[in-house]
Amino acid sequence: MTFENNSHAYIVENGRNVREVVIVRRSGDFYLVRFADRGGGIRLREGRIFATQEAAEETLPKAKKVYRSPYDYWH
């Protein structure tokens, strides 16, 4: 998906946080984005940028629920 300048998008930070960004400039497959809540920015490939927050949240890893017995402890 191609994003226009000054449009809002979402990225996944550290594999666990979804963050809103503003598109500043496009150069080939890379976008220069500025964080919406603070100054500063980052340069990312098009595949790391999502149009909606829900689309970004779908890429987050799902937490696995592991059952542990109360008797399962280290001796």
Image (cartoon, rainbow, N blue to C red):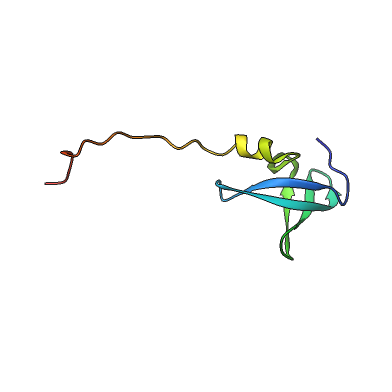
Q: Residue furthest front?
A: 70
Locate residue 29 relative to residue 53 in the image: left or right: right
Left or right: where 69 falls relative to 21: left
Whether residue 66 is situated above or below residue 44 in the rendered picture: above
Percent position of residue 69, x then y: 21, 35
The residue that appears at 77% across and 54% down in the rendered structure is 33
Q: Is residue 69 above or below residue 28?
A: above
| Outermost residue to the right | 5
Q: Residue at x 62, y 39 (%)?
A: 57
Q: Position of residue 1 (x, y in %)?
A: 80, 35
Residue 24, horizontal then vertical, whole percent: 84, 55
In the rendered image, which quarter is residue 40 located in? bottom right
Q: Is residue 58 left or right of residue 8?
A: left
Residue at the limit of the structure toward the left, as seen here: 75
Residue 39, image x, y percentages: 74, 66
User: Is residue 40 placed above or below 31 in the rendered structure?
Assistant: below
Foreground residue among 70 and 2: 70
* Quadrant of res 35: bottom right
Residue at left offset 55%, top offset 47%:
16
- Residue at the location (29% across, 33% down)? 67
Q: How many marks?
A: 0
